[in-house]
Image (cartoon, coloured by chain):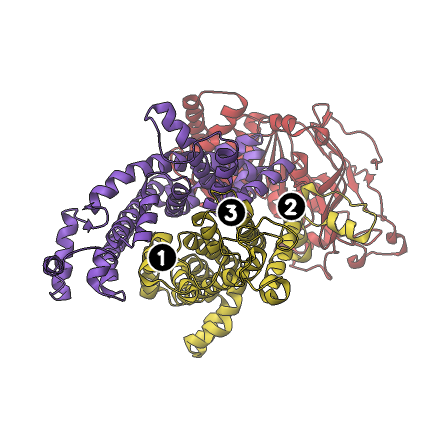
Chain colours: A yellow, B red, C purple
């Protein structure tokens, strides 16, 4: 007997079974306003990523609009070691510079390093994964071997050693980190590229004689975008923590004040001993919140990808 | 909604009364099953047949409360004097595997790939009967032997090392090891070739005989259903449309859908049914089969009840959901 | 080449690469290679400098230097620190045991606790308590470990005076050591725990919806029985390698925590070496740390291939 109509209904049931997993905490919202009802109906995951997105955008705004938001130029000196007060909402550091302004301008550096490193890592990772997954065979073996090796090298110690010698500017730091972090992106891109390159339309194109490069760019690449996005975001998070870590050791760019450098100064210039907690609390909180926002959005996208895979 | 007509001959082992299952999805409310009524008698094989997506698997899984949390289930499933749908998860866990067992489709995925076959079969013994591990493994191996898999180190193998047919038998062994009173087999022949499918079905039947259990067989394979089951229930778009003795339903189908379904068989000429199954999200009122029915008339806009029809040549009564009767 | 052969090759290549990097970095960085090898601000007489140059082979060709370098490595000679007036290997091995004392128990405890609680959280993902637990560990996961340690140090040691401010011990008794180690060990465990928690939770969430879990339930297994008899093993396997890779990250975190708590281990060693530009120490530390991380990876790899029958029975 032939299957007469498998279409819509089995899909509907399959989707229902999948959604059943997610909606256990949901109840029929009877909120008074439309907004309240909307908030009640969305799942926790969506709410969390919404919060993440909101935080993320605020930090981006902070970096872009630093000159508008900061009350003073962070390099101007006032009276040092002032407690938070009206004039200086977060007090001043050991050189008398306003900490709030430092914080706001610092977002630029931290974000640029984070994005720069993540971008570099993603580009390298995507290229490696793409070539590996598409060409397979020896190319795959070599590239994956390379990936494994890079994965094994502990990244932060290596960056510390290199930074100790090179005394790099923050651009260099971003570059260095990017050249070490591409591995997880490469792995994910590779498995997706393997999948796509086996699909009918890609094989057809190959048979028709299109060049490999063309196929990779026009067919495989668009399909891996939504796999790469969450990895990109999570790389930003790792890069920011790493940048903060090496700045804490004093290896950051002294000409620019990233959040990590602020914590370093607080620790090494008497901020800690004298109990000026606001000096290191503010930048630390900023790092944490920004990383959290990125992780929330990135995790949400990743889980969405996994759940679409489950349906297929 | 109650059925019309006299009570069945024996007291049924399992009675499904007015089972309705619907899911809330992003696409709308999916009505997977509507007012399904079934009786499973002691020692019989009841086959539920229908096309893919008609809701038969949903019904089978609902009996053991195995469907996901976002489903709303109404109706009753009476077993041993209790309504299974009202029991808690812990109470259900006592019944599953011990008194009522189910065998899923897709055996290779239903078994844990990294746990040995014999351990997975022995598990119900450890969980329900609290037998020590060594004894339970011994009994598991015996069970496999009865299913013809005693040699070749199958017991110590992992599911990824075994074929689909072998895995199916491992799953059956795990389901049967505690001699449950009811076995639910959800498309046991799916993914297997014709010969193997028949073998598996016959094994199920044979085991059922030995254990004096009842078998609820879910399948889309009409011929298989006819051959090994005593009674057949035909489902269409979430509803039961006809129930009766297997051979009788085959020889003299009453419901237009059953007639059309049988006509699809290669033996009867391979005539497909025109049109498509209705959507389960926005079901049309009235008889579900109305748009595609050959015998339709205006009354069919109203949903018919299940009626009993006496057939003097046959052993038991037939039930049909059609205005023709 | 067999699979394990290929793996072994990768490890050997990685080690080889690291050692060669260690050779190449000081000699290719800007500045006088001698300074890069000795460290800056080292006070030596001119004649001694010439002697050193000859001894270190800097006047010879690169390939010769390279061979010389390997000979030294095999003798476990990692160079000499002119700042601390001792051989690098001596200093590192002495300090390393303190770092390991801090890191290893925390790592193991964090891994076990993180895996178990992460598994439970993934299993009962709908429960509101577990959602809050996840939010908590997520916050810890996102916080730079040294920052959290700073705050805790400030609140509990500085302000409340409950714990000592620095060092591994004052008097050397076991209780005293425990008192000193408590805070840094807790922070390390928390750090390791949060990472393992998030990874395990994700893995269990993925495995939760599988058909074999549903079949286990259909056999009459109840709730956590399904988790621990089935899902846990399946969820743990793919992340063993992930956890091993994390070891490197966690060890790096240990260094930072040591610095914050002024402990006498590798972390402070590296921090001081950075301040005084003592390059031999930095390089030696990097080498040793990398070897440890690679060994951890190797062990995890071996463990994985023993545990996963799909790999064992290829």
Q: Is residue B7 visible?
A: yes
Q: Is residue B199 visible?
A: no
What residue is pinned by disc 1?
A159
Q: Is residue A174 left or right of residue A50?
A: left
**Separation (CA) of disc 3 from disc 1:** 20 Å
Residue at far right of view: B298
Q: Quadrant of residue C189?
A: top left
Q: What is the crowding at mark 3: few (fewer than 14 residues within 10 Å), some, or many (at least 20)?
A: many
Q: Which mark is residue C143?
A: 3
Horizontally, is B11 left or right of C36 in the view? right
Same chain? Circles 2 and 3? no
In the image, residue A108 lies at what x, y percent? Answer: 53, 63
Q: Which residue is mark 2?
A: A22
The reply to whether callout 2 and callout 1 are in contact (CB within 8 Å) is: no
B204 horizontally vs B229: left or right: left
Q: Is there one chain holding both mark 3 and mark 1?
A: no
Above or below residue C298? Residue C129 is: above
Question: Which marked residue is nearer to the observer: mark 2 or mark 1?
Answer: 1
């Amino acid at each position: 007997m032939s299957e007469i109509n498998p279409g819509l209904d089995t899909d509907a049931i399959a989707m229902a079974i999948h959604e059943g997993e997610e909606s256990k905490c949901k109840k029929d919202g009877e909120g008074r306003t439309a907004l309240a009802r909307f908030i009640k109906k969305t799942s926790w995951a969506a709410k969390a990523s919404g919060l993440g997105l909101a935080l993320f955008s605020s930090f981006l705004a902070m970096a872009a609009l630093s000159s508008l938001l900061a009350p003073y130029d962070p390099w101007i000196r006032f009276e040092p070691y002032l407690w938070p007060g009206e004039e200086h909402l977060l007090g001043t550091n050991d050189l008398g510079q306003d900490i709030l302004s430092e914080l706001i301008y610092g977002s630029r550096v931290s974000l640029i390093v984070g994005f720069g490193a993540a971008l570099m890592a993603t580009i390298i990772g995507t290229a490696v994964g793409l070539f590996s997954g598409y060409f397979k065979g020896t190319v795959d073996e070599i590239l994956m071997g390379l990936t494994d090796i890079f994965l094994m090298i502990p990244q932060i110690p290596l960056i510390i050693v290199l930074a100790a010698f090179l005394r790099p500017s923050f651009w260099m730091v971003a570059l260095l980190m990017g050249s070490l972090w591409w591995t997880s992106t490469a792995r994910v891109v590779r498995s997706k590229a393997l999948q796509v390159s086996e699909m009918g339309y890609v094989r057809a194109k190959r048979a028709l004689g299109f060049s490999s490069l063309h196929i990779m760019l026009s067919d495989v690449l668009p399909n891996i975008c939504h796999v790469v996005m969450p990895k990109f975001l999570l790389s930003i998070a790792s890069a920011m923590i790493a940048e903060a870590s090496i700045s804490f050791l004093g290896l950051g760019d002294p000409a620019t004040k990233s959040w990590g450098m602020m914590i370093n100064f607080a620790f090494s210039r008497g901020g800690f001993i004298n109990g000026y907690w606001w000096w290191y609390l503010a930048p630390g909180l900023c790092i944490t919140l920004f990383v959290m926002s990125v992780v929330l959005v990135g995790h949400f996208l990743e889980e969405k990808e996994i759940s679409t895979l489950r349906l297929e | 909604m109650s059925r019309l007509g006299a009570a069945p001959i024996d007291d049924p082992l399992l009675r499904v009364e007015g089972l309705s299952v619907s899911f809330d999805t992003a696409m709308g409310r999916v009505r997977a099953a509507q007012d399904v009524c079934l009786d499973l008698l002691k020692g019989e094989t009841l086959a539920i047949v229908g096309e893919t997506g008609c809701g038969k698997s949903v019904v089978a899984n609902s009996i053991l409360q195995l469907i996901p949390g976002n489903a709303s289930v109404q109706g009753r499933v009476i077993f041993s004097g209790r309504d299974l749908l009202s029991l808690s998860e812990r109470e259900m866990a006592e019944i599953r595997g011990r008194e009522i067992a189910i065998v899923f489709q897709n055996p290779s995925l239903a078994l844990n790939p990294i746990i040995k076959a014999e351990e997975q079969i022995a598990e119900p013994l450890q969980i329900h009967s609290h037998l020590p591990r060594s004894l339970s493994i011994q009994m598991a191996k015996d069970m496999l032997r009865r299913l013809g898999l005693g040699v070749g180190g199958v017991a110590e193998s992992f599911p990824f090392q075994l074929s689909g047919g072998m895995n199916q038998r491992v799953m059956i062994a795990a389901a049967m090891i505690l001699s449950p009173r009811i076995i639910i087999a959800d498309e046991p022949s799916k993914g297997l070739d014709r010969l193997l499918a028949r073998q598996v079905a016959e094994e199920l039947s044979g085991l059922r005989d030995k254990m004096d259990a009842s078998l609820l067989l879910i399948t889309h394979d009409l011929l298989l259903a006819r051959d090994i089951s005593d009674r057949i229930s035909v489902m269409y778009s979430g509803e039961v449309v006809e129930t009766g003795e297997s051979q009788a339903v085959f020889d003299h189908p009453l419901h237009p859908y059953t007639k059309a379904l049988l006509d699809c068989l290669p033996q009867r000429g391979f005539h497909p049914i025109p049109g498509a199954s209705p959507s389960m999200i926005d079901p049309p009122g009235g008889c579900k089969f109305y748009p595609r029915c050959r015998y339709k008339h205006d009354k069919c806009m109203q949903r018919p009840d299940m009626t009993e029809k006496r057939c003097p040549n046959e052993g038991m009564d037939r039930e049909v959901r059609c205005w023709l009767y | 080449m067999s699979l394990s052969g290929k793996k072994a090759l990768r490890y050997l290549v990685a080690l080889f690469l690291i050692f060669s990097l260690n050779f190449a970095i000081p000699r290719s960085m800007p500045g006088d290679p001698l300074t890069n090898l000795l460290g800056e601000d080292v006070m030596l007489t001119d004649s001694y400098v010439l002697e050193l140059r000859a001894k270190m082979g800097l006047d010879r060709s690169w390939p010769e230097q390279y061979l010389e370098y390997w000979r030294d490595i095999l003798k476990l000679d990692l160079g000499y620190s002119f700042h601390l007036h001792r051989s690098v290997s001596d200093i590192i091995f002495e300090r390393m045991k303190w770092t390991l004392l801090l890191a290893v128990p925390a790592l193991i405890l964090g891994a076990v606790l993180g895996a178990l609680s992460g598994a439970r959280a993934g299993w009962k993902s709908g429960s509101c308590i577990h959602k809050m637990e996840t939010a908590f560990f997520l916050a810890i996961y996102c916080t730079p470990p040294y920052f959290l340690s700073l705050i805790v140090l400030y609140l509990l040691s500085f302000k409340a005076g409950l714990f000592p401010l620095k060092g591994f011990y004052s008097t050397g008794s076991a209780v005293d050591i425990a008192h000193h180690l408590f805070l840094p060990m807790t922070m390390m465990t928390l750090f390791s725990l949060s990472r393992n928690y998030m990874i395990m939770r994700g893995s269990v969430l993925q495995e939760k919806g599988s058909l074999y879990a549903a079949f286990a339930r259909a056999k009459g297994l109840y709730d956590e029985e399904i988790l621990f008899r089935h899902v846990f093993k399946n969820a743990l396997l793919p992340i063993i390698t992930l956890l091993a890779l994390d070891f490197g990250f966690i060890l790096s975190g240990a260094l930072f925590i040591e610095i914050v708590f002024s402990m006498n281990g590798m972390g402070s060693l590296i921090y001081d070496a950075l301040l005084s530009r003592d390059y031999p120490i930095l390089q030696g530390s990097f080498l040793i740390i990398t070897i440890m991380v690679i060994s951890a990876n190797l062990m995890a790899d071996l463990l994985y291939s023993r545990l996963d029958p799909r790999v064992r029975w290829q």
